[in-house]
Image: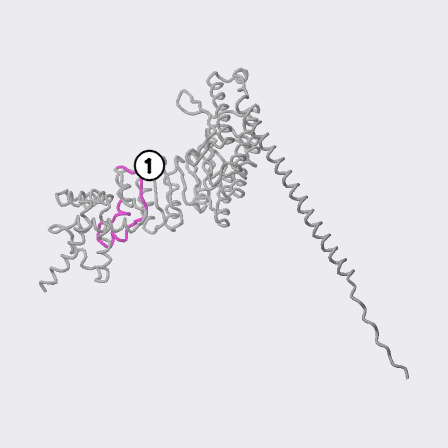
Amino acid sequence: MEVPQKKAKTPPDDTKDDRAGTVRAARQIAELQEELDKCRRERIAMEERHDQVVRDLKSALEWAYTAENIPREHWHEKGYSEEYAGAMEELQNTFKGIIKDLRTGAFTSETDIFGVFFELQHDDGHYITSDHDDVLMPYWKEFANALIYWSEYHAGEESLQVIVDRVATPDAVLDVLRPALKRSRVKYLGFEDDGSPKTWRLAEFIEDIIHTNHEVTKVGFSRIVLSNEEWKAICNAIKLRNSQCASILRSFEMRKCFVDGISDEVLRDILTSNTKWINLEGNGMSSNESPVIAEFLASNPPLASLLLKGNCFDDADAALLADSLSSNTTLKVLDFDGNSIKQEGRLAFLRAIFDVSSLASCAASNHTCLVAGLKPHISDLNNCFDEFYNKWGKIFGMLALSSVDSFINMALLGAVPTSLMPALLYRAHDQDEESNSAVTNLYLELTDTRRCKKHLAWKYMKHTRSLSSVYELVRGWVVPSMNV
């Protein structure tokens, strides 16, 4: 009988592990080599970029310091006056100065406003807008490049305000500025011209900047003439930006852009663009526009400031606009300087923000809107950011100034619920505000009351007014209860 033999054990094959280790090592070496090559390429690219930046900076500064101005004869040959040629020379020097400052980082948060200005006036005092000339294109290109350079290497957290004032910017110039302004740290962009209609793509240009550069939070136009369709396109761009982006466009200025008023459609587009501050100075607006503005304000929109200076609103318009403030709690400033509003219109606004017919009416007045530009001025009312200070200043002024025998007219408090008395005492502590002194003059005007010593005492009491108010309130409640 055969006995089965045991099979010998096969020794482990170490060569497989060695081969696997070799493969892993080779892969790691390749990865490290690839990473090293990447770092070398990045270093070379960085050095090349640095060298290019240095060359560009050197070239730009050399141009700004050494470029000769266009000879005055160039402008004389085109029929311009010696004064015009001199103003063009100053414009070129302005360009060079701006380019130097941008390239060297001289602009700071204290000097963040710079403008490309053309300074030349007619004999009648009106400013002239320069004509475009292709010889100026190198200046525009250097300016655009310098703006990009400042934004990339000097801006940090700062932003600039850029104004082009009375300098022609045809499409060729806008095409140069567009790429720079789309990527630069600019918070305000303004254009000012002579009010002459021109064929240019400014509206399309502004739309593009609003959509792409969310650093821009303010745009302004002065004496810029565009079609209603172009203004509507700009308004729609602002509205779309503000509905979709956290960085909203807060300020929209259109000064002297319309000669004989604004159409209802365009005005509604402007007002409903969802900006916080709107400036419509000098647009010839009057009774045609006041119903549209009043209806808008009465809807209590998020608008914080509306400047209507230099228009043609009268007392009837003022009454209509003042009435809209009764349902508005968001508007902080309404400016009518330079309009045709007289005493009746002024009183309409004064009664809207300080109704002294009763204590309840006073409390229900508008306490948020400062109305400026009226004469005599009423802007001392509602001049605190917190509406509670405005409201209680009027209430305590009315309580003190309407009293005959005592410091506080307790009779006006007869209908006030007892539960509100602690709030009244608490607000008495706020009556040290010196701005409350203005309440005296306006209260006397509204009530046709003759000034007496008591009125002067309240007006000039200042730092003791709070303590006196608390004392008189407590005394007025305690003494009658002792006689019951």
Q: Position of residue 34 (x, y in %)?
A: 69, 47
Considering depth in this image, is 10 or 75 the residue closer to the camera? 10
The relative height of residue 190 versus residue 22 in the rendered view (above or below) is above
The amino acid type of the residue labelled 1 equals Asp
Q: Position of residue 428 (x, y in %)?
A: 22, 53
Q: Is residue 374 magenta?
A: yes
> What quarter of the picture does the C terminus occupy?
bottom left
The relative height of residue 310 versus residue 37 in the rendered view (above or below) is above
Q: Is residue 320 left or right of residue 15?
A: left
**Which residue lies under the disc numbered 1?**
337
Q: Quadrant of residue 148?
A: top right
The relative height of residue 216 versus residue 100 in the rendered view (above or below) is below
Q: Is residue 220 left or right of residue 204?
A: left
**Residue depicted at x 20% and y 48%:** 397
**Residue depicted at x 87% and y 79%:** 4
Near mark 1 (Cα within 10 A), the count class, few <14, some 14-19 or many ≥20, is some
Q: Position of residue 322 (x, y in %)?
A: 31, 46
Q: Is residue 331 magenta?
A: no
Q: Position of residue 121 (x, y in %)?
A: 42, 22
Tell how many labels.
Answer: 1
Range of magenta residues: 350-375
Q: Is residue 15 left or right of residue 356?
A: right
Considering depth in this image, is 77 or 430 the residue closer to the camera? 430
Q: Is residue 171 left or right of residue 123?
A: right
